[in-house]
Amino acid sequence: MPKKRMNREQRHATMADVAAHIGVSRQLVGLAFRNAPGVSAETATKIFSAAEEIGYQPNLAAQALRREGSKYIGVAYHTSHSSSEELLPAIYKAAEAHGFKVILSAISSRRSDQEALNEIIGHRCDGAILISSTLSVAHIKQISKALPIVSLSRRIEGVNCGVVSSEGERGVYDAVQYLASIGHQTIAYVDTSEMLDHEFRLQGYLDAIRDRKLMTRVVTMSGDYIESAGAEAAKLFIGQGGLPTAIVCSNDQVALGLAYKLQQAGIKVPDDVSIVGYDDTVASLPFLDFTTVHQDADELAQAAVKDLAERIAGNISSRKIYLTSAKLVVRSSTRSPRTSQG
Amino acid sequence: MPKKRMNREQRHATMADVAAHIGVSRQLVGLAFRNAPGVSAETATKIFSAAEEIGYQPNLAAQALRREGSKYIGVAYHTSHSSSEELLPAIYKAAEAHGFKVILSAISSRRSDQEALNEIIGHRCDGAILISSTLSVAHIKQISKALPIVSLSRRIEGVNCGVVSSEGERGVYDAVQYLASIGHQTIAYVDTSEMLDHEFRLQGYLDAIRDRKLMTRVVTMSGDYIESAGAEAAKLFIGQGGLPTAIVCSNDQVALGLAYKLQQAGIKVPDDVSIVGYDDTVASLPFLDFTTVHQDADELAQAAVKDLAERIAGNISSRKIYLTSAKLVVRSSTRSPRTSQG
DNA sequence: GGATTTCGCTCGTCTCTAAGG
DNA sequence: GCCTTAGAGACGAGCGAAATC
């Protein structure tokens, strides 16, 4: 004897409940919640206070189903990337400003990009932001036919989607120029080949070194954990004897691993060696206070959401790339090199 | 002249499309996708391959709307907590095993617990897991009337919800006992008063110190960033002269900040001072290799999801607490103290 | 007649009953 | 009995059109 319906107390309130509570039609409640014109101010207040009283919250599934667009933006991101800490809140905010809600879909070693994307499609998101996605170009190309896509932190080519990334070549270039300007002659770079878009940051290093007519010294790492990549790099620098006076890293986590390991070996930062990171995530922690290249989460998020919103509206359909600012922030992990003595 | 309907190509495929494609009824497709009995194996394969071909993905909104239960579990979590990295994938997995999908809802300085929860309610999740929620007891109490709740990493009292947390008192107790057993006499503890459930870990320290008849030395920090709390604690230890031979921290991030700052001051870990963390997040990074207390993300996630699933099924309605294992993992940040010399 | 309110159909799926091969 | 279809009524809200004051 299955009961047809839960009793009133136990189920969630609906528009009809709100309407019945104050004796108006369900549709009128709907208009009020959509801020549609045609609801008198007086009635609106009555409706909202009644909704509050009985604890009404709009059913998002019903809205998404009925609307022509779901008004959702799907965001696929890696739980293990520290940059998400800043990025996700920024995306929430930017999405809200454009009238979208956010559906997060996590990627991890146990949950593939594809699974994350399927969930986004299942929710009928109007568009998706893929953060640091490693899906193949062909695959993203195919997906982008069904759904507007923005690739964040990966400058994918050959796909008609939005591409948003910080201008790594500029940021690293500036960092190297700065180091050279305060007297550094041997400036090394720690490259992490598995990191997306690593090549642009590396290029910035190479360009600056060329312009300054210095010697390049690039250490390329491929570790899983990026902090560990920095630590491994430290071993190489120590082992090879000639320690450079400055080291630029492809990201903050690498810089942390590097600095930690160097200091453990009795090499002081910045006294013996200057270190520069990238991203301004952990670098901004007061006890580290690393010089780094700041990429602004809000700027990235706003560019991504704005482009996506326009794609959803049908105003863009070709590839478009946005490079957001990458600004050198000088803190206490860098200083002029010691004047070499005897 | 607004068009009533997008043309077939541009909208997402539905069950009806799949059915039409192979000339069966829409209902049969529904049965197949629900793995309901009454579909021949042959037909099932035809249906699934047709679905694949035309790119059909079930509309989650429609499912959630129609079903008695949405089969969603909402998870509210802080983007800035590193423990989420492991926990979220573990929750996805556990939820799937119980037939639930996961809806993530981020909490940050720009998005309150309340907003996160409203989204979860809006999706009509059947239950919610609140990770490290700082909502008031009264508030959670109220929410738990509308929705089964599990509090993860916060041992909330006075609310009829599931409570899952690692057995911090045991883990820290074991850590201190271990340090004492290898010869340490002065063992300090860094407490972070703003961290949820910090008191249980502290209690483990106090109990072990009492049992070993040693002196307590607790440094209580209240910083925003927990790595910074560790760094600040380092300053205190250095300033106060008498450095302990071992320091136990309330979590790994504190241990990292502490170790970094101590080494910067020329104090070697573990030669001069042994350090123990808690959580086994960053502690497991190879270059750190900190001794720590491991709390198992899968164990936490499974306990949380299982309890929640039973609450949803109506089998539990009172408060129930699960303490998951907290195991000391000895790595290279601890060793016997130097024998003191004149 | 303009502001306010209501009607009626619809989104895609589930679920139930009844019945056909 | 097996597998399959038909038909119909939800679920909760959106939205164009019609009705009311």
Image (cartoon, coloured by chain):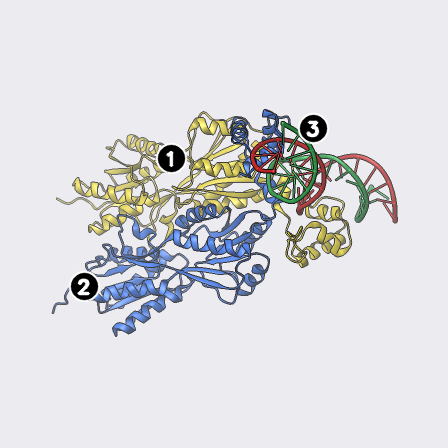
Chain colours: A blue, B yellow, C red, D green
Residue on which the image places disc 1 = B196
Residue on which the image places disc 2 = A337
Do tag 1 and tag 2 residues touch (Cβ < 8 Å)? Answer: no
What amino acid is labelled 1 in the image?
Answer: Leu
The chain identifier of the residue carrying mark 2 reads A
The chain identifier of the residue carrying mark 1 reads B
Other residues around mark 3 within 10 Å, as few (<14) / some (14–19) / many (≥20): few
What amino acid is labelled 3 in the image?
Answer: Lys
Other residues around mark 1 within 10 Å, as few (<14) / some (14–19) / many (≥20): some
Other residues around mark 2 within 10 Å, as few (<14) / some (14–19) / many (≥20): many
- B229 to the left or right of B21: left
Residue at 20% x, 51% y: name it. B266
Mark 1 vs mark 2: in front = 2
Mark 1: secondary structure: loop
Counting from the top left corner in percent of width and height, residue B155 is at: 42, 31
**Cα gap from disc 1 to disc 2, whole angstroms:** 44 Å
Give the camera-side residue of B22 and B328. Answer: B22
Residue on which the image places disc 3 = A3
The chain identifier of the residue carrying mark 3 reads A
Mark 2: secondary structure: loop
Residue B62 visible: yes
Residue at 67% x, 51% y: name it. B5
**Cα gap from disc 3 to disc 1, whole angstroms:** 42 Å
Mark 3: secondary structure: loop
Which mark is drawn over residue B341?
A: none
